[in-house]
């Protein structure tokens, strides 16, 4: 049986070019546990490595991982690996699939979602808007269809928990709590029209508050995303911010905000007061937008997408070693960016290229083909020089059958800056509707201040 699984895995790996014409077999997943001991590395010039679940890879064997890492990560291995690292090889192609309700919704609404001429998504209800077997590899719209699938992936009730973001060059850590509530596309709630009742046309909401440092303590924010943003590129999020110095809730510009928002700050010239920044990128000097929870959500309508390939990669999609707040002193190596002392699984990834319509930096995104959780990211300027590279860390919740966002690490090469986010105790369990409605209230920003 293992030999059959191995043969299937190798055949899929080697026949990508042949399958990339019109066949949907390009999207098929390898069999669970099908790594077998002699599976070939993903890159022909990489040293052979017999990948076995349970193997431990330290710095002395890091070369053996080269065939299973994106080149952008390997080329920056000095940042992401270190002398004391200890990667445990996890399951190969483990089953982290969404629950039955999500798969059933995908089938129920097959053909219901409409892709607009400009790349917008209309009439999506629940499940994946474009079932993988309906996407032909040679369809010029395959990239945007997959991008909408990534945005619509199963995320249970959202997530909530404490987090810490550390700018490893310029500032002290920020600690706080964050939450994201999925309001629409709730596959497990058909009796409620697949959404949380009485939440209008909103897709999701997110928010949080800071505990530390003292200068940011009790600052809170709220972000609301409307379904209109799926068909109107000009429709930004509604963004609100509470400052204890003014004791008022302020509107914030949402231009440049694509994912789950966490404020950045600058010191005002008068009195040294903290003022919130939107985190938007400057056109002349692209800035990192993935220093916290950015990148976990997409605005596909703002980009042209292209499928580059599928490939097998090792990634920390189901990490096991606690970080903040469970362990605030975990060792991340000299760079502060290494989650290498953990379990990394072999996964089949989908690699997407995204070119923004406004002419901003081009990016490449690796997502897990089964769960569509983001794995790796790199961005490039107009000359092809890399601007930013990094990865996300997940943990599979068997109860909710979703990947929870427990960490990330990114470095901005052109700015000589790096960030790490830890959120180990985050939970994706759904909440009571009354708690969701309370969180959506703008007035709630001023509570407990």
Image (tube, rainbow, N blue to C red):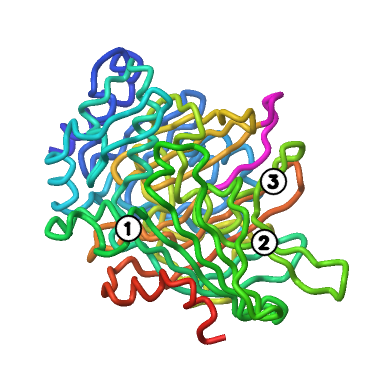
Quadrant of the image for the C terminus?
bottom right
Residue at the disc numbered 3 = 287
Given contact means CB atoms under 8 Å apart, are the residues at marks 1 and 2 in contact? no
Tell me which residue sits at (53%, 52%) in the image: 294
Tell me which residue sits at (62%, 59%) in the image: 252
Residue at disc 2, secondary structure: strand
Given contact means CB atoms under 8 Å apart, are the residues at marks 3 and 2 in contact? no
Query: Which is more N-terminal, label 1 or label 3?
Result: 1
Mark 1 vs mark 2: give the one in front.
1
CA gap, disc 1 and disc 2: 29 Å
- Quarter of the image for residue 199 reads bottom left
The stretch drawn in magenta includes residue 385: yes
Residue at the disc numbered 1 = 200
- Image coordinates of residue 255 in percent, x first then y, are 60, 47
Q: Is residue 134 above or below residue 105?
A: above
Per the rendered image, the range of residues in magenta is 381-390
Tell me which residue sits at (30%, 18%) in the image: 15
- Image coordinates of residue 221 in percent, x first then y, are 55, 68
Residue at disc 3, secondary structure: loop
Estimate how packed mark 3 is, as few (under 14), some (14 to 19) or many (20 or more) residues with alpha carbons within 10 Å: some
- Image coordinates of residue 270 in percent, x first then y, are 87, 71
- Quarter of the image for residue 40 reads top left
Residue at the disc numbered 2 = 264
- Image coordinates of residue 24 in percent, x first then y, are 23, 23
Quadrant of the image for the N terminus?
top left
Query: Which is more N-terminal, label 2 or label 1?
Result: 1
Residue at disc 1, secondary structure: loop
Given contact means CB atoms under 8 Å apart, are the residues at marks 3 and 1 in contact? no
């Amino acid at each position: 049986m293992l030999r059959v699984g191995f043969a299937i895995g190798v055949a899929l790996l080697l026949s990508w070019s042949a399958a990339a014409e019109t066949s949907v077999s390009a999207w098929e997943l390898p069999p669970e546990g099908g790594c077998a001991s002699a599976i070939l590395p993903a890159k022909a010039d990489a040293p052979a490595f017999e990948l076995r679940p349970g193997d431990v890879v330290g710095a002395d064997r890091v070369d053996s991982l080269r065939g299973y890492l994106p080149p952008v990560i390997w080329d920056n291995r000095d940042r992401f690996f270190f002398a004391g690292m200890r990667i445990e090889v996890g399951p190969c192609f483990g089953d982290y699939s969404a629950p039955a309700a999500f798969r059933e919704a995908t089938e129920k609404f097959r053909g219901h979602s409409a892709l607009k001429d400009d790349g917008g998504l209309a009439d999506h209800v629940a499940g994946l808007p474009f079932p993988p077997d309906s996407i032909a590899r040679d369809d010029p719209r395959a990239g945007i269809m997959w991008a909408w699938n990534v945005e619509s992936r199963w995320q249970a009730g959202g997530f909530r928990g404490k987090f810490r973001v550390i700018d490893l060059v310029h500032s002290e850590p920020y600690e706080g709590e964050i939450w994201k509530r999925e309001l629409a596309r709730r596959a497990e709630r058909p009796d409620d029209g697949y959404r949380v009742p009485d939440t209008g046309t909103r897709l999701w909401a997110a928010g949080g508050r800071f505990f530390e440092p003292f200068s940011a303590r009790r600052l809170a924010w709220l972000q609301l995303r409307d379904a209109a943003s799926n068909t109107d590129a000009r429709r930004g999020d509604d963004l609100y911010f509470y400052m204890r110095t003014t004791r008022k809730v302020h509107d914030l510009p949402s231009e440049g905000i694509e994912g789950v928002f966490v404020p950045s700050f600058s010191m005002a010239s008068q009195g040294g007061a903290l003022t919130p920044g939107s985190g938007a990128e400057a056109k002349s000097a692209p800035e990192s937008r993935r220093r916290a929870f950015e990148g976990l959500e997409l605005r596909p309508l703002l980009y042209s997408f292209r499928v580059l390939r599928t490939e097998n990669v090792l990634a920390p999609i189901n990490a096991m070693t606690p970080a903040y707040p469970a362990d605030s002193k975990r060792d991340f190596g000299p760079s502060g960016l290494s989650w290498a002392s953990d379990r990394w699984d072999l996964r089949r990834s989908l690699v997407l290229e995204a070119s923004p319509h406004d002419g901003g930096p081009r990016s490449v995104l690796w997502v897990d083909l089964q769960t569509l959780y983001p794995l790796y990211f790199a961005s490039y300027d107009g000359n092809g020089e890399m601007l930013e590279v990094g990865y996300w860390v997940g943990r599979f919740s068997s109860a909710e059958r979703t990947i929870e966002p427990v960490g990330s690490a990114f470095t901005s090469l052109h700015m000589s800056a790096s960030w790490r986010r830890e959120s180990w105790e985050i939970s994706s369990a759904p909440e009571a509707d009354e708690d969701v409605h309370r969180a959506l209230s703008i007035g709630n920003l001023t509570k407990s201040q």
